[in-house]
Image: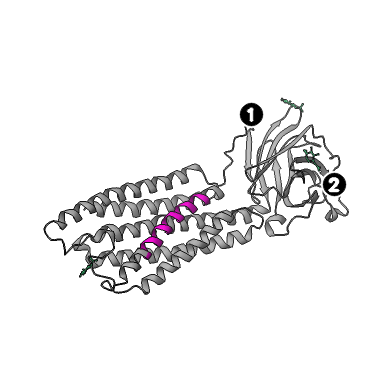
Amino acid sequence: MNRKISMKTLVFSSFFTAIFLLGSSNAQSCSFSFPGRSYATCVSLPVLNSFLHWTYHESNRTVDLAYRHTQITASKWVVWALNPSGGAMAGAQCLVAFTNSSGGVQAYTSPIPVPGYTNTQLEQGQLSFQVPRLSAEFGGNQMTIFSTIVLPDAGTRFTQVWQHGDVSGNRLLSHPQTQEHQSSFGSIDFSTGVTSGTGASIAGSRQRRRNVHGVLNVVSWGILIPIGAMTARYLKVFKAANPAWFYLHAACQTSAYIVGVAGWGTGLKLGSDSPGVVHSVHRKIGITLFVLGTLQVFALLLRPKPDHKYRIYWNMYHIGIGYSVIILSIINIFEGFDLLDPEKKWKRAYIGILIFLGANAAILEALTWFIVIKRKKPDSDKYSHSANGINGSSGYGA
Ligand SMILES: *[C@@H]1O[C@H](CO)[C@@H](O)[C@H](O)[C@H]1NC(C)=O
Ligand SMILES: *[C@@H]1O[C@H](CO)[C@@H](O)[C@H](O)[C@H]1NC(C)=O
Ligand SMILES: *[C@@H]1O[C@H](CO)[C@@H](O)[C@H](O)[C@H]1NC(C)=O
């Protein structure tokens, strides 16, 4: 009875988690605190994992800003620019930062000329407006440009441009030409905080894809597979659940595998769409999980009969890979949370689900041992320690 209720609760909690995660369409967070500094406004820029934090002082038309470009390596240059002429690259007034060949972070200004702008190597030069302060810091796969600029002309609405590219020695190579790199500009109003950009729709769809990727994988690898493992381990012991546990286990893991492979595919696509982004660990674990999950599905088809002498080895193999998949899945989901950087509550929700599953497993584990030991006394052969899966008491699954 209790078990039934807890399974129901599990299914519901995973369902609602999925709905919540889908609902958080703009999960990228501006909630970043700079030691010793604070800014009044922040916008999450639509592409290239970037954020602009700033405070606008109307009295002297200055903007104190921090441009934060996340998920890049030290071998990249980073630019945030204002373009008073309204274009994207031609005429952009750039704040440039990169890690030089001796490991120091350099920050300087570079105006991009209007004619011949495509040949720029971001040479140092004075901008068309004043830049009283400029510095940059790199750390934790994140480059931040700190600056104070004096807004040119009148008004507070300008075109902003942001970019990154490779550094070779001390030479800044031209930026990649992917869709993201070509749409990393848009308007910004420093007074109202309103931004818009051509990149916005691309970024919106990308953000949706990232959320879909997260939800599919959390629900499949992170929730369904552990539940499927629990059905095998804890239902087996009950006589009444004799063939049922097997069907439940197989159905749960097969559907988890199908959803998981879909989630895996969205991840591969996301990875290939953002070259230069650092998530090799997440990717490697993801590929390993796909291989192990596929092995499990084939193992199901190739399993020896329950009374076959090699069945014990098959069981050890199946259970061993199964637990590895669960552990790796949980690790990779947390890697994924760090990459997606959603609001803290989603990570907490998943931790909550894990604690819930863990608590249920602990209770059921105790119950299982209790039943097994109790049964062993009067009739030891019939239910020979079925709970550990070495010899399925059900005898099912041939
Ligand atoms: C601009 O004005 C603000 C206060 O309104 C002040 O804190 C800031 O230092 C000024 N910036 C410059 C560069 O003068
Ligand atoms: C690298 O940057 C640091 C800090 O800005 C600077 O002191 C150093 O001279 C630079 N090295 C080269 C080779 O440019
Ligand atoms: C497994 O169960 C079968 C009966 O289903 C029994 O004959 C056999 O001895 C059991 N093996 C072990 C290792 O308990």
Rendered residue at 69%/35% (across/down): 191
Q: Is residue 41 above or below residue 358?
A: above
Where residue 75 appears, x then y in whole percent?
71, 50
Where residue 143 appears, x then y in whole percent?
68, 43
Does the residue at mark 2 contact the one at mark 1 (Cβ under 8 Å)? no
In the image, the segment drawn in magenta is 317-335
Query: Quick check: 46 left or right of 368?
Result: right
Q: Tell me which numbered mark, 2 or 1, is placed earlier along the sequence.
A: 1
How many residues crowd around disc 1 within 10 Å: few (fewer than 14), some, or many (20 or more)?
Answer: few
- Tag 1 residue: 36
Q: Toward which corner of the image does residue 137 lie, by quadrant? A: top right
- The secondary element bearing badge 2 is classed as loop
Rendered residue at 59%/38% (across/down): 32
Q: Is residue 26 visible?
A: no
Query: Quick check: 197 left or right of 326?
Result: right
- The secondary element bearing badge 1 is classed as loop
From the viewer's side, name the closer residue of 134 and 160. 134
Rendered residue at 59%/41% (across/down): 30
Rendered residue at 80%/47% (across/down): 92
Query: Quick check: 250 left or right of 195?
Result: left
- Tag 2 residue: 123
Residue furthest to the left: 378
Q: Is residue 63 visible?
A: yes
Ligand 2, by image quadrant, is: top right
Amino acid at circle 2:
Glu
Residue furthest to the right: 115
Where residue 58 appears, x then y in whole percent?
72, 29
Q: Toward which corner of the image does residue 311 lie, by quadrant? A: bottom left
Amino acid at circle 1:
Gly
Where residue 63 appears, x then y in whole percent?
72, 33
From the viewer's side, name the closer residue of 274 and 199. 274
